[in-house]
Image (tube, helix red, strand yellow):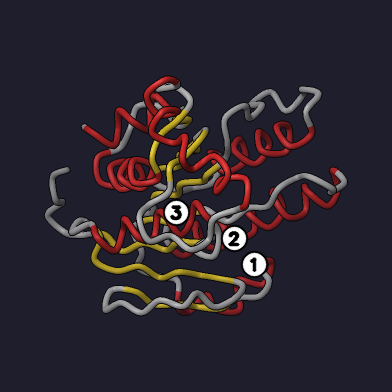
Amino acid sequence: MPIPASPIQVILTGATGMVGEGVLLECLQNPAVARILMINRRPYPLQHPRLQELLVPDFLHIESVASQLSGFDACFFCAGVTSVGKSEADYTRITYDTTLHFASTLAALNPQMTFIYVSGAGTDSTEQGRTMWARVKGRTENALTRLPFRQAYNFRPGFMQAMPGQRNLPTLYKIFAPLAPLLLKLLPNHASTLKQVAQAMIQCTTRGYPRQILEVRDIKTQATS
């Protein structure tokens, strides 16, 4: 991956989850990233010269720390929750309302920013399908692309192989982790590595991409371009 003339400064959410942690670890290793501000609801136990942490227990009140959010080139929004056991109203509040409030605050402060939202394979762009989570994610994607960012992308990864050294791995992933190399080989359009996801995010920020929705194939293409 070519290093941009000016390494980027990134806001990252979700570091206490699998996706966000994997993206964070790659960003810390990647010379294209100069600085990472991770915004977490609870502390993440990692220190690094290029890493800062800002604790915000409720992202619906992100404006309370607005003075610390200017001057960034990108936001990699990896925070999210499962829809299992949640009503559509509760899932919408967490997934749509919280994400849009967070993103709208950043758009007002950093209109030159690239905003990248981690959605998921199977998201419903029509917002009309039968699957609740897919409708809500689709509504969220659509709304984000209408915000006044320089660029906005929606990532739809499938199975993701973790980065070495990750701590925040769900039980289901740990069960399937030994099969990761096989899944990557047998299901190339449905599986990638978290390293590839992070690399594609950085590439989208520095070089752009012709589509706002990146499926697994797009993510892998962008990661290696």
User: Mark 3: few, some, or many residues within 10 Å (few <14, many ≥20)?
Assistant: many
> Which residue was labeled with disc 1?
59
Residue ID at (18%, 59%): 31
Image-based side of 15 in relation to 143, left or right: left
Observer-nearest residue: 43 or 207? 43
Instruction: Identify the mark nearer the N-term, 1 or 3.
Output: 1
User: Mark 1: few, some, or many residues within 10 Å (few <14, many ≥20)?
Assistant: many
Q: Look at the image and tell me in which quarter the C terminus lies.
A: top left
Residue 85 lies, in percent from the top left, at 84, 48
Nearer the observer: mark 2 or 3; the answer is 3
The amino acid at mark 3 is Phe
Q: For numbered disc 1, what is the local secondary structure?
A: helix
> Which residue was labeled with disc 2?
102
Write down the quadrant of residue 184 in the picture: top left
> Which residue was labeled with disc 3?
76
Residue 129 lies, in percent from the top left, at 77, 22
Residue ID at (55%, 71%): 40
Image-based side of 83 in relation to 119, left or right: right
Q: For numbered disc 3, what is the local secondary structure?
A: strand
User: Circles 1 and 3: CB distance less than 8 Å?
Assistant: no
User: Mark 2: few, some, or many residues within 10 Å (few <14, many ≥20)?
Assistant: some
Q: For numbered disc 2, what is the local secondary structure?
A: helix
